[in-house]
Image (cartoon, rainbow, N blue to C red):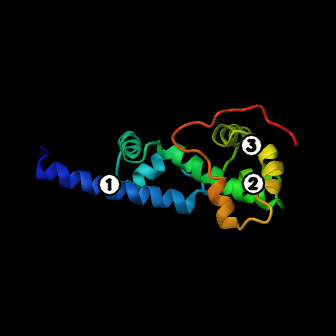
Amino acid sequence: MTSRPAAAQHLRDLARLRRVRDRIDREYAHPLDVEALARGAHMSAGHLSREFRRAYGESPYGYLMTRRIERAMALLRRGDLSVTEVCFAVGCSSLGTFSTRFAELVGVPPSVYRRQAARATEGMPSCVAKQVTRPIRNREAQVTEPHLA
């Protein structure tokens, strides 16, 4: 059985973690790193990373990248921005890292996704398209050979 002070500390940590997650959701397009997030939560970077993973099943960086990829998917479906423009619009500073992470989460590179998603979600309300094309969290997508239609 945990003591009252330990339980109270755990609840305070959970509240801080929720604020960190909310900040990532709001500021995903801004430069964010674990050290800055930890400072804002008055925690060490290591403690934040461990507790965030325990609470949400992935690291703060993983959660940030998932948010960025979700937003990138929406922008790519819209079709009016290049992959490079989308990369920078969602806060990534490296096209290579963005493309690699996108392919890991979605299963295809962003350029292929852009072509396929435009056809696959044509006529679909954006809120429905977002749900059916949501990236996989907490495990990597099975990488398949991209099929060009």
| Residue at the image position 66 percent from the left and 63 percent from the top | 128
The front one of 119 and 10 is 119
Residue 144's label in the rendered image is none
Do tag 2 and tag 1 residues touch (Cβ < 8 Å)? no
Q: Is residue 13 shown above or below 50? A: below
Who comes first in sequence, dot 1 or dot 3?
A: 1
Q: Is residue 117 shown above or below 106? A: below
Name the element at disc 2. helix
x then y, percent, for residue 110: 76, 45
The front one of 81 and 79 is 79
Whole-number angstrom distance, CA of label 2 to CA of label 1: 33 Å
What residue is pinned by disc 1?
14
Q: Is residue 53 left or right of residue 116?
A: left
What residue is pinned by disc 2?
86
Who comes first in sequence, dot 3 or dot 2?
A: 2
Which image quarter is the N terminus in? Answer: top left
Disc 2 crowd, CA 10 A, few/some/many (<14, 14-19, 20+): many
Q: Amino acid at mark 3?
A: Leu
x then y, percent, for residue 28: 58, 56
What residue is pinned by disc 3?
95
Do tag 3 and tag 2 residues touch (Cβ < 8 Å)? no
Outermost residue, right side: 149
| Residue at the image position 35 percent from the left and 49 percent from the top | 43
Disc 3 crowd, CA 10 A, few/some/many (<14, 14-19, 20+): some
Name the element at disc 3. helix
Q: Amino acid at mark 2?
A: Val
Q: Amino acid at mark 1?
A: Leu
Who comes first in sequence, dot 2 or dot 1?
A: 1
Name the element at disc 1. helix
Q: Is residue 26 left or right of residue 117?
A: left
x then y, percent, for residue 142: 64, 33
Disc 1 crowd, CA 10 A, few/some/many (<14, 14-19, 20+): some
